Image (spheres, grey):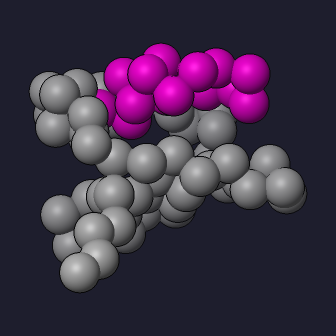
Amino acid sequence: MVHIRFEGRSLDLTEAQLGITANMNDQVVKEHVSRHLDIHANRLASYVIDRRPSGDFIIRPEAVYG
């Protein structure tokens, strides 16, 4: 499962829907997500990809505290 948080929206998709696999690096995953969202890949440049022990991905904005 891939959970994406983008500009106030939350999407839950499968890896197959995005065409990604667990062994892809973060940049490639972001490129696939950007194509799905129909946005330029640089809009995800500051996003974080959390790879969970379950194999799920969480793609979200970087958290800023303080």
* 9 relative position to 20: left or right: left
Q: Which residues are magenta?
A: 19-34
The relative height of residue 57 versus residue 20 in the rendered view (above or below) is below
Closest to the observer, 19 or 48: 48
- Percent x, y for residue 22? 74, 30
Q: Would residue 20 be counted in the magenta stretch? A: yes
Closest to the observer, 37 or 55: 55
* 32 relative position to 21: left or right: left
Q: Quadrant of the C terminus?
A: bottom left
The relative height of residue 50 versus residue 38 in the rendered view (above or below) is below
Q: Residue furthest right?
A: 54
Task: Mark yes or no: residue 34 visible.
Answer: yes
Q: Quadrant of residue 44?
A: top left
The relative height of residue 4 versus residue 34 in the rendered view (above or below) is below
- Percent x, y for residue 20? 61, 26
* 41 relative position to 55: left or right: left
* 7 relative position to 50: left or right: left
Q: Quadrant of residue 45?
A: top left
Q: Would residue 37 be counted in the magenta stretch? A: no
Q: Residue furthest bottom?
A: 66
